Amino acid sequence: MDLEPRAVASAAALDTSTPSIVSTGWGTRDYLLRRALAAADVLALLVALAVAGAIFTGGQPRFELLPVALPLLPVWIGLFKLYGLYDRDVKRISHSSLDDVPWLFHALLLGTLGLWAYLRLTGFQRLTLAEATIFGATALVGVCLTRTTARRAVGRRVGKERVVLVGWDASSELVAGRIASDPDSDLELIGVVAPGDLEGADASSPPRLGTPSGLADVLSRTKPDRVLLSRSDLSEAEMLDLLHTCRMSSTKISVLPGAIEALGPAVELDEVSGVVLLGLTPLVLGRTSRWLKRSLDVSVSALGLLVTAPLLLAIAVAVRVDCGSPVLFRQRRVGKGDRPFELVKFRTMVAGAEGRRAELMARSRDPNWLDLAHDPRVTRLGRFLRRTSLDELPQLWNVLRGQMSLVGPRPLPESEDCLVRGWARGRL
């Protein structure tokens, strides 16, 4: 069997970590809050539809607008989710309903246009400009009010967010003092994880829970909602290890500025009593997100196979004429949950290519796997197929079967997957 060690760009394995670094569910606080926000949005949209339908058009109110538009409610929730309106609370401590307004306004504008099109397609009398304006304005105000109520209700139900502070320096000491002195703070500081004794600490200072190397044990014992992480005197490697530990326990993370080079772009500005924090995206893919992702994979891959069927046939014939049989290249890759599967794509190498692997490894740019600027085993047609990524079209079948995802990391061969260890497996 020919082995073709090149990156798969168009479709990728879902994940390979064991145990998975990506949590399949939210903590109690976030679980309740997300559902409370969705219920608040539904209530506000229903009221806005009722108000819009009550407008007199030609002397008569149109109360039938409400039942006709009811089937669109799940679509509205999906649209709000696409705009991140259920995800920002887990990133930011101080997030409020007013912070949602820019995304909410855009989502309502797009959703109202969709409502207008839906009413036209269903044969219902068209939505007038006055009705659309009243609906959008009422929904914007109503969603902000109901979301505020939902956040307060969940806060009263589950109490303050319990946090552990990692690192002890001037910035983290300031944060601890602000949390302790602010009676309206939404945070409850459990304690501090620091390499040594807390300098400048007094009787009112939070207790020391352990050292950074024992963070996993601290998180297991205290089960905090969030970790506030200060770089202090930690190296970049130690920072990455701490981030990995938090993610493995599905603990939310906020970082005091100073560790930006270890974080990447997926952060949001936050604050606690005037102290700036950086909120990191939690590695959680809940049931709704997984269902939406899988639905997208199935629909797009099925449509893609149907639409590209003539092209697939033409490429298969071209490969058969250019390089003979077999037309398809098959390779064992590692997929979700470390489950192996057989990846398929069009063959782009000459017969017996694997027999030259050991010979070519001496010219590889990477000592762990074969990486050549110009691989002599690739055929002329194969170079065209690789350059245009047409050789990867058969992987839509892997996506349809649930072995890969349209968006995700590259599925690695078993010989390469075993080389990825520690926090680096977070990408998988």
Image (cartoon, grey):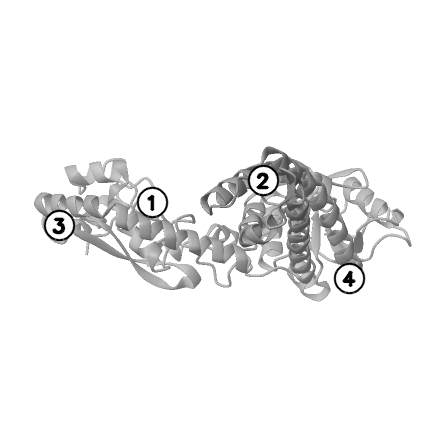
**What type is the residue that disc 2 sits on?**
Ala
Residue 263 in picture, x, y percent from top left: 59, 41
State the residue position of label 1: 7
**In the rendered image, which residue does mark 2 sit on?**
107
Most extreme residue toward the top, as rendered? 129
Position of residue 233 in the picture relative to residue 249 (left or right): right
Residue 235 x/y as whole percent:
62, 43
> Which amino acid is tagged 1?
Ala
Q: Earlier in the sequence, mark 3 or mark 4?
A: 4
Dot 3 corresponds to which residue?
351
Looking at marks 4 and 1 on the same chain, the residue that comes earlier in the sequence is marked by 1
Q: Quadrant of the N terminus?
A: bottom left
Earlier in the chain: of badge 3 and badge 2, it is 2
**Label 3 is placed on what type of residue?**
Ala
Q: Does residue 334 appear anywhere in the picture?
A: yes
Label 1: how many Cα within 10 Å (few below 14, some 14–19, many 20+): few
Q: Which mark is residue 20?
A: none
Check disc 2: other Cα within 10 Å, few if <14, some if 14-19, many if 20+: some
